Image (tube, grey):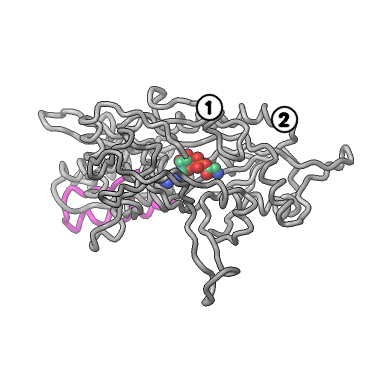
Amino acid sequence: MTDNETPVDAASSDELMEKIVNLSKRRGFVFQSAEIYGGTRSTYDYGPIGVLLLRNVKDAWWRSMVQMRHDVVGLDAAIMGPPAVFEASGHLANFSDPLVECRECNSRHRVDQLEVENVCPSCDSKDSFTESREFNLMFKTQAGPVEGSGHEVYLRPETAQGMFTNFMNVQMTTRKKPPFGIAQIGKSFRNEITPRNWVFRTREFEQMEMEYFVPPEEAPKWYEFWRNERFEWYLDLGIPESMLCMRDHDEDELSHYSSGTADVEFLFPWGWGELEGIANRGDFDLQQHAKHSGARIEFFDQATDSRYVPHVIEPAAGATRAMMAFLIAAYHEETVNDETRTVLRLDPRLAPYQVAILPLSKKEDLIGPCERILADLQPHMMADYDITQAIGKRYRRQDEIGTPFCVTVDFETLEDQAVTVRDRDTMEQERVPIDGLLAYLLPKIGK
Ligand code: GAP
């Protein structure tokens, strides 16, 4: 849970974050939840553009972790879980952060994140903190209309436990043999003491996790394999190498289940922060669930007529946090004709829209061709359609939401059955016949 956050130049960091948060609000990426009631700092809503970006991040992960592999299958497990699951996983006993309360202003803080030791960041009082105590991060609620013990459930703090409790179900139904993995994308909930840095640390967020079950002696080899694979995934989707690093956890940082963890870290505006952890969890989880449930959880290897409990290598990423990193890495400002152009240089596979169709005028004659082009392209990609405002303003809007190609339909189109395609990054324009537009775009957007 500790993120290796190192402050960089605070002023420029604040300025960049402010620009990104403003752009996100203005263009419909991310809104504060319940904003009309004052909003919260701990949950966020993904708007019409943000939901597309977030979905593309999750699709890219699913494609690389499930679709492109024969040894990984998917799962969508329940969010609510009985206490027994979290008793066995160790979350009830260990999933906590150290909390102090200020006696002067009653604010609460995570001890390990105080900028100045023994000084309250809310009211600047010195030595006003209570003794530090462990605060469990799980959200507890009750299932059904009866209150009290026996009816408590927890919102999952990670998606991982669903993969462990379903290990036998998945193994028996798919007949997979270790090494094989179970992957899941979904919401997780943590009652973070100090949610902060926009969607970096929130109380409700999405994770993309895969549990890779291996013969015990192969664990070190697969740990190395997944460290490399996961690092490459971010590079392949456009995060520059200078903004990524791999950091091995020190012994005293390791989670209660881990015998080795490395984090993929990203250079956020305020410094390095965790994007994803790759952990060697050993046989901790399967052993714990076997012990607590009484179920037999193991793999029977017919080839050697022997049974063993597989070890687990876990790449665990945050979908919402990764989306934030892709946004930050893509954000560019440049001067064009003495004006500042803001452009998101998102990989076309992640961009909310791959193309925008823009008629030069609202005149009826141009609407027909636009509708035909949309019908051609929409089965293959997300296509925006914008008929408002002057063309320059519409290009700027598409640059700001990262659309890699704008297709302009003008009066010449009626003569030559061709359109102008504008490239987001080079701003170069090319005349392309309508008939050939789909074939022109597909390879450029990674299809
Ligand atoms: N199953 C292991 C596990 O959950 P983790 O490092 O606690 O490991 C994995 O979480 C990833 O989930 C993190 O690297 C981060 O990207 C994301 N994550 C964790 N807590 C988060 C929070 N409060 N808000 C947003 N993302 C979070």
User: Which SS class for mark 1?
Assistant: loop
Residue 136 percent coordinates (x, y): 48, 51
Q: Is residue 232 left or right of residue 32?
A: right
Magenta residues, start to end: 352-379
Q: Position of residue 251 (x, y in %)?
A: 56, 28
Residue drawn where x is 25% and y is 26% of the image: 9
Query: What is the distance, in whole Å, between disc 1 and disc 2 at their CAs?
Result: 23 Å
Q: Is mark 1 within 8 Å of ligand 1?
A: no
* Residue located at (74% from left, 45% from top): 176
The answer to which of 361 and 220 lies nearer the viewer is: 220
Q: Is residue 438 visible?
A: yes
Report the residue at 49% width, 61% height from top.
140
Does 123 appear above or below 48?
above
Looking at the image, can residue 428 be seen? no
Is residue 285 left or right of 319 when viewed as pictured?
Answer: right
Q: Is residue 407 magenta?
A: no
Q: Is residue 236 left or right of residue 403?
A: right
47 left or right, relative to 339: right
Q: Amino acid at mark 1?
A: Asp
Q: How many marks?
A: 2
Looking at the image, the residue that sits furthest to the top is 242
Q: Residue furthest left?
A: 338
Residue 321 is situated, as x and y percent measured from the top left of the image, at 40, 42
Crowding around mark 2 (Cα neighbors within 10 Å: few <14, some 14 to 19, many 20+) is some
Label 2 secondary element: helix
Which x, y percent locates residue 303?
87, 38
**Residue at the spot of label 2:** 218
- Queried whether the magenta region covers residue 367, the answer comes back as yes
- Dot 1: within a 10 Å radius of its alpha carbon, few (fewer than 14), some, or many (20 or more) residues? few
Residue tagged 1: 250
Q: Is the CB of the residue bearing disc 2 within 8 angstroms of ligand 1?
A: no
